[in-house]
Image: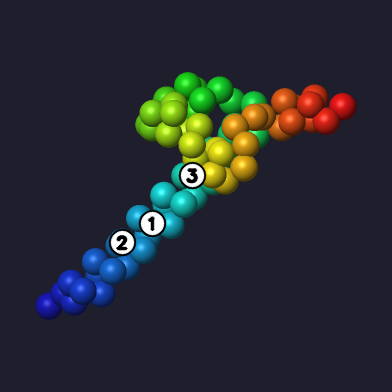
């Protein structure tokens, strides 16, 4: 017999880790210069959601190049 409590708990943990990894990849793609529309399409999320994820993780919505240009 399946221990549903344990199995579902493991599955929920795996899903949460996958979501966190996706968010980290979204933020990294933005730093590398990808547009929010492209990121949204690639990750199957709305481009505004991609923007909010980048801001939450990176502290900013700009690309790495845009940040460097502003500091020069």
Residue 62 percent coordinates (x, y): 64, 29
Residue 55 percent coordinates (x, y): 56, 39
Helix or strand or loop: what does disc 2 sit on? helix
The answer to whether residue 55 is above or below residue 21 is above
Report the residue marked by disc 2: 12
**Residue under the point 18% across and 72% down:** 4
Marks 1/2: CA–CA distance: 6 Å
Report the residue marked by disc 1: 16
Rendered image: mark on residue 23: 3
Of pointers 3 and 2, the one earlier in the residue sequence: 2
Marks 1/3: CA–CA distance: 11 Å
Helix or strand or loop: what does disc 3 sit on? helix
| Residue that protrudes farthest toward the right in the picture | 72
Q: Are marks 1 and 2 in contact (CB under 8 Å)?
A: yes
**Residue under the point 31% across and 61% down:** 12
**Residue under the point 25% across and 70% down:** 7
């Amino acid at each position: 017999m399946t221990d549903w409590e344990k199995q579902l708990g493991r599955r929920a943990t795996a899903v949460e880790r996958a979501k966190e990894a996706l968010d980290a990849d979204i933020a990294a793609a933005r730093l590398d210069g990808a547009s929010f529309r492209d990121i949204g399409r690639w990750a199957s999320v709305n481009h505004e959601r991609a923007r909010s994820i980048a801001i939450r993780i990176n502290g900013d919505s700009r690309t790495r190049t845009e940040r460097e240009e502003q500091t020069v």
